Image (tube, helix red, strand yellow):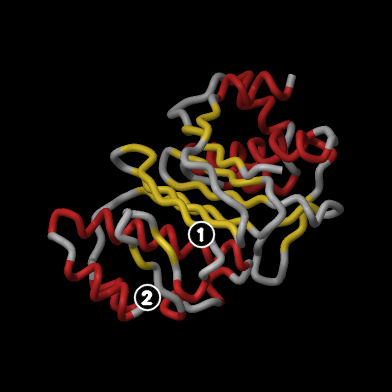
Amino acid sequence: MMITIQVLQVPAELPEAYWNLFQSRVSEGRRGQAARFVHQADAYRSVLGEVLTRVTLSKLTGLRPGELSFTRNKYGKPALSNYADVQFNVSHSGDWIALISGGDTDLGVDVEKIAPIDMKIAERFFSLTESEFLAAEPAEMQLETFYRLWTLKESYIKAVGMGLSMPLDSFSMIRNADGNWHSPEAAAYPFLSLRLDHGHMIAACSAGDDLPNQPDVITIEELYQALL
Protein backbone atom coordinates (compact mmCIF):
# COMPACT_ATOMS: atom_id res chain seq x y z
CA MET A 1 0.00 0.00 0.00
CA MET A 2 1.50 3.28 -1.10
CA ILE A 3 1.73 6.26 1.21
CA THR A 4 -0.39 9.25 0.28
CA ILE A 5 -0.27 12.78 1.62
CA GLN A 6 -3.46 14.79 1.24
CA VAL A 7 -3.95 18.47 1.92
CA LEU A 8 -7.21 20.38 2.27
CA GLN A 9 -7.46 24.16 2.24
CA VAL A 10 -9.84 25.43 4.92
CA PRO A 11 -12.31 27.97 3.50
CA ALA A 12 -13.13 31.24 5.20
CA GLU A 13 -16.80 30.23 5.20
CA LEU A 14 -18.62 26.96 4.54
CA PRO A 15 -22.17 26.68 3.17
CA GLU A 16 -24.52 25.76 5.99
CA ALA A 17 -25.49 22.46 4.35
CA TYR A 18 -21.84 21.45 4.11
CA TRP A 19 -21.08 22.41 7.71
CA ASN A 20 -24.11 20.55 9.01
CA LEU A 21 -23.14 17.38 7.11
CA PHE A 22 -19.51 17.55 8.21
CA GLN A 23 -20.49 17.98 11.86
CA SER A 24 -22.90 15.05 11.65
CA ARG A 25 -20.05 12.73 10.59
CA VAL A 26 -17.61 13.40 13.42
CA SER A 27 -17.56 12.18 17.00
CA GLU A 28 -19.73 13.74 19.67
CA GLY A 29 -16.58 14.92 21.43
CA ARG A 30 -15.41 16.68 18.28
CA ARG A 31 -18.75 18.44 17.86
CA GLY A 32 -18.61 19.62 21.45
CA GLN A 33 -15.07 20.86 21.00
CA ALA A 34 -16.02 22.72 17.83
CA ALA A 35 -18.92 24.42 19.61
CA ARG A 36 -16.58 25.76 22.28
CA PHE A 37 -14.14 27.44 19.91
CA VAL A 38 -14.35 31.22 19.90
CA HIS A 39 -13.15 31.49 16.30
CA GLN A 40 -15.02 29.69 13.53
CA ALA A 41 -11.75 28.93 11.73
CA ASP A 42 -10.65 26.77 14.67
CA ALA A 43 -13.91 24.84 14.55
CA TYR A 44 -13.54 24.31 10.81
CA ARG A 45 -9.99 22.97 11.16
CA SER A 46 -10.95 20.59 13.97
CA VAL A 47 -14.01 19.13 12.25
CA LEU A 48 -12.59 19.02 8.73
CA GLY A 49 -9.45 17.31 9.99
CA GLU A 50 -11.54 14.47 11.40
CA VAL A 51 -13.77 14.30 8.32
CA LEU A 52 -10.78 14.03 5.97
CA THR A 53 -9.31 11.33 8.19
CA ARG A 54 -12.54 9.35 8.31
CA VAL A 55 -13.17 9.56 4.56
CA THR A 56 -9.63 8.47 3.73
CA LEU A 57 -9.37 5.67 6.28
CA SER A 58 -12.79 4.30 5.32
CA LYS A 59 -11.29 3.52 1.91
CA LEU A 60 -8.38 1.69 3.56
CA THR A 61 -10.54 -0.37 5.92
CA GLY A 62 -13.74 -0.91 3.95
CA LEU A 63 -15.79 0.58 6.80
CA ARG A 64 -18.08 3.56 6.46
CA PRO A 65 -16.60 6.82 7.78
CA GLY A 66 -18.97 6.88 10.75
CA GLU A 67 -18.08 3.31 11.77
CA LEU A 68 -14.45 4.15 12.51
CA SER A 69 -13.38 4.66 16.10
CA PHE A 70 -10.11 6.06 17.35
CA THR A 71 -7.81 5.70 20.32
CA ARG A 72 -4.65 7.50 21.41
CA ASN A 73 -1.42 6.30 22.95
CA LYS A 74 -0.18 7.81 26.20
CA TYR A 75 1.57 10.58 24.27
CA GLY A 76 -1.56 11.51 22.32
CA LYS A 77 -0.82 9.91 18.95
CA PRO A 78 -4.11 8.78 17.34
CA ALA A 79 -4.71 5.30 15.92
CA LEU A 80 -7.66 3.28 14.67
CA SER A 81 -9.13 1.21 17.47
CA ASN A 82 -9.33 -2.12 15.63
CA TYR A 83 -6.94 -1.53 12.75
CA ALA A 84 -3.54 -0.94 14.32
CA ASP A 85 -1.84 -1.78 11.03
CA VAL A 86 -3.53 1.13 9.19
CA GLN A 87 -1.07 3.98 9.52
CA PHE A 88 -2.00 7.66 9.50
CA ASN A 89 -1.22 11.03 11.03
CA VAL A 90 -2.93 14.39 10.75
CA SER A 91 -1.98 18.03 11.30
CA HIS A 92 -3.59 21.43 10.76
CA SER A 93 -2.51 25.04 11.03
CA GLY A 94 -3.60 28.28 9.43
CA ASP A 95 -5.42 27.60 6.16
CA TRP A 96 -4.43 23.96 5.72
CA ILE A 97 -5.11 20.44 6.97
CA ALA A 98 -2.67 17.65 6.11
CA LEU A 99 -3.18 13.89 6.35
CA ILE A 100 -0.62 11.16 5.68
CA SER A 101 -1.79 7.55 5.39
CA GLY A 102 -0.91 4.15 3.95
CA GLY A 103 2.27 2.10 3.92
CA ASP A 104 3.33 -0.34 6.61
CA THR A 105 5.44 1.86 8.88
CA ASP A 106 4.88 4.68 11.34
CA LEU A 107 4.00 8.03 9.75
CA GLY A 108 4.19 11.67 10.79
CA VAL A 109 3.08 14.93 9.20
CA ASP A 110 3.20 18.53 10.34
CA VAL A 111 1.91 21.72 8.73
CA GLU A 112 2.63 25.15 10.15
CA LYS A 113 1.56 28.67 9.31
CA ILE A 114 4.66 30.78 8.71
CA ALA A 115 4.71 33.79 11.01
CA PRO A 116 7.50 36.07 12.28
CA ILE A 117 9.29 34.51 15.22
CA ASP A 118 12.14 35.29 17.57
CA MET A 119 15.01 33.20 16.26
CA LYS A 120 16.31 32.75 19.81
CA ILE A 121 13.67 30.05 20.17
CA ALA A 122 15.93 27.89 17.99
CA GLU A 123 18.60 27.94 20.68
CA ARG A 124 16.05 26.54 23.15
CA PHE A 125 14.60 23.76 21.03
CA PHE A 126 17.04 22.92 18.22
CA SER A 127 20.24 20.90 18.40
CA LEU A 128 23.54 22.75 18.26
CA THR A 129 24.04 21.52 14.68
CA GLU A 130 20.68 22.97 13.63
CA SER A 131 21.14 26.23 15.51
CA GLU A 132 24.51 26.79 13.84
CA PHE A 133 23.07 25.88 10.44
CA LEU A 134 20.18 28.30 10.91
CA ALA A 135 22.47 31.12 12.08
CA ALA A 136 24.64 30.67 8.97
CA GLU A 137 21.69 31.03 6.59
CA PRO A 138 21.21 34.37 4.78
CA ALA A 139 18.95 36.65 6.82
CA GLU A 140 16.21 36.54 4.20
CA MET A 141 16.17 32.72 4.36
CA GLN A 142 16.21 32.23 8.12
CA LEU A 143 12.44 32.29 8.67
CA GLU A 144 11.82 29.70 5.96
CA THR A 145 14.67 27.50 7.22
CA PHE A 146 13.36 27.75 10.78
CA TYR A 147 9.96 26.45 9.70
CA ARG A 148 11.50 23.72 7.56
CA LEU A 149 13.46 22.50 10.58
CA TRP A 150 10.50 22.86 12.93
CA THR A 151 8.02 20.97 10.72
CA LEU A 152 10.56 18.25 9.90
CA LYS A 153 11.29 17.71 13.58
CA GLU A 154 7.59 17.71 14.47
CA SER A 155 6.84 15.17 11.74
CA TYR A 156 9.52 12.87 13.16
CA ILE A 157 8.39 12.98 16.78
CA LYS A 158 4.80 12.43 15.61
CA ALA A 159 5.87 9.38 13.60
CA VAL A 160 7.76 7.99 16.58
CA GLY A 161 4.58 8.59 18.57
CA MET A 162 6.15 10.36 21.54
CA GLY A 163 5.18 13.94 20.78
CA LEU A 164 7.02 16.63 22.69
CA SER A 165 8.01 14.13 25.37
CA MET A 166 10.93 13.53 22.99
CA PRO A 167 13.24 16.56 23.32
CA LEU A 168 13.54 18.42 20.03
CA ASP A 169 17.27 18.86 20.56
CA SER A 170 17.85 15.10 20.89
CA PHE A 171 18.17 14.69 17.12
CA SER A 172 19.18 16.85 14.15
CA MET A 173 17.78 17.53 10.71
CA ILE A 174 20.46 18.08 8.06
CA ARG A 175 20.04 19.33 4.50
CA ASN A 176 21.79 17.20 1.89
CA ALA A 177 23.67 18.59 -1.08
CA ASP A 178 20.65 17.77 -3.28
CA GLY A 179 18.39 19.88 -1.07
CA ASN A 180 16.66 16.94 0.61
CA TRP A 181 16.69 16.43 4.37
CA HIS A 182 17.71 13.57 6.62
CA SER A 183 18.42 12.87 10.28
CA PRO A 184 21.56 10.97 11.33
CA GLU A 185 19.67 9.69 14.37
CA ALA A 186 16.88 8.34 12.14
CA ALA A 187 18.83 7.20 9.10
CA ALA A 188 16.08 4.86 7.85
CA TYR A 189 13.46 7.63 7.78
CA PRO A 190 12.78 9.38 4.47
CA PHE A 191 11.60 13.00 4.85
CA LEU A 192 9.65 15.44 2.71
CA SER A 193 9.70 19.22 3.14
CA LEU A 194 7.95 21.80 0.98
CA ARG A 195 5.88 24.96 0.99
CA LEU A 196 2.14 24.59 0.52
CA ASP A 197 1.89 28.25 -0.40
CA HIS A 198 3.66 31.49 0.51
CA GLY A 199 2.43 31.28 4.10
CA HIS A 200 2.51 27.59 5.06
CA MET A 201 5.12 24.84 5.35
CA ILE A 202 4.55 21.08 5.41
CA ALA A 203 6.87 18.21 6.33
CA ALA A 204 6.31 14.46 6.47
CA CYS A 205 8.27 11.33 7.28
CA SER A 206 7.86 7.58 7.49
CA ALA A 207 9.78 4.91 9.35
CA GLY A 208 11.06 3.47 6.08
CA ASP A 209 8.47 3.46 3.29
CA ASP A 210 8.93 5.85 0.38
CA LEU A 211 7.07 9.14 0.48
CA PRO A 212 5.33 10.82 -2.48
CA ASN A 213 7.03 13.85 -3.99
CA GLN A 214 3.94 16.03 -3.69
CA PRO A 215 0.70 15.99 -1.69
CA ASP A 216 -2.68 15.47 -3.32
CA VAL A 217 -4.94 18.51 -2.99
CA ILE A 218 -8.46 17.59 -1.83
CA THR A 219 -11.33 20.04 -2.29
CA ILE A 220 -14.20 20.75 0.07
CA GLU A 221 -16.57 19.65 -2.69
CA GLU A 222 -14.85 16.27 -2.98
CA LEU A 223 -15.06 15.78 0.76
CA TYR A 224 -18.74 16.71 0.79
CA GLN A 225 -19.59 14.35 -2.07
CA ALA A 226 -17.75 11.49 -0.37
CA LEU A 227 -20.16 11.72 2.56
CA LEU A 228 -23.40 11.77 0.61
What crowding class fits label 1: few (fewer than 14 Cα within 10 Å), some (14-19), or many (20 or more)? Answer: many
Q: Earlier in the sequence, mark 1 or mark 2?
A: 2
Q: Nearer the viewer, residue 193 or 10?
A: 193
Where does the N terminus fall, quadrant-wise?
A: top right
Judged by depth in the image, the label closer to the viewer, 1 or 2, is: 1
Q: Is residue 188 visible?
A: yes
What crowding class fits label 2: few (fewer than 14 Cα within 10 Å), some (14-19), or many (20 or more)? Answer: some
Disc 2 marks which residue?
125
Residue 138, image x, y percentages: 13, 60
Residue 77, quarter of picture: bottom right
Residue 145, image x, y percentages: 28, 58
Disc 1 marks which residue?
155
Residue 226, image x, y percentages: 70, 23
Residue 28, image x, y percentages: 75, 44
Q: Amino acid at mark 1?
A: Ser
Q: Amino acid at mark 2?
A: Phe
Question: Is 96 located above or below residue 132 in the figure?
Answer: above
Question: Is 37 located above or below residue 62 in the figure?
Answer: below
Q: Residue at x 58, y 44 (%)?
A: 99
Q: SS at mark 2? A: helix
Cα gap from disc 1 to disc 2, whole angstroms? 15 Å
